[in-house]
Image (cartoon, rainbow, N blue to C red):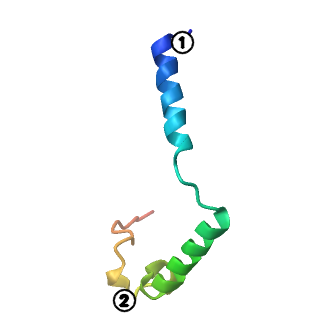
Amino acid sequence: MNDLGTLKIQVEQLRNESRIKREKLSVTLLDMKNFIVQHQDSDHLLKGFKKKEHNPFKSKEVCNLV
């Protein structure tokens, strides 16, 4: 089973985690929404690329099936 040293480490970790400041989910979601709205003009997943060759995610391989 667990020895005393391991249990002390676990207790200290739990104490550290209990000191972390928590944000309400509603505040966090509002921050995320504001960030997305502010950066939507430069988001290629929303707007796409102006030219196909500017897309770094397109497949470079060509598959030829006979």
Residue at image point 55% right, 80% down: 34
Residue at image point 49% right, 33% down: 13
Residue at image point 39% right, 90% down: 50
Can you say which quadrant of the picture contains the C terminus? bottom left
Residue 9 at least partly seen:
yes
In this figure, which residue is indicated by the disc labeled 1?
Answer: 2
Query: Residue 36: horizontal and vertical position, in percent?
Result: 52, 79
Q: Amino acid at mark 1?
A: Asn
Nearer to us in this view, 44 or 27 = 27
Q: Which mark is residue 56?
A: none
Q: Amino acid at mark 2?
A: Lys
Rounded to the nearest angstrom, the CA distance separating label 2 from label 1 is 60 Å
Query: Residue 39: horizontal and vertical position, in percent?
Result: 46, 83
How many C-alpha atoms fall within 10 Å of the one at disc 1: few (<14), some, or many (≥20)? few
**Kind of element beneath mark 1:** loop
In this figure, which residue is indicated by the disc labeled 2?
Answer: 51
**Which quadrant holds residue 56?**
bottom left
Can you say which quadrant of the picture contains the N terminus? top right
**Which quadrant holds residue 57?**
bottom left
**Kind of element beneath mark 2:** loop
Q: Is residue 19 above or below residue 13?
A: below
Q: Is residue 65 left or right of residue 37?
A: left
Nearer to us in this view, 55 or 19 = 19
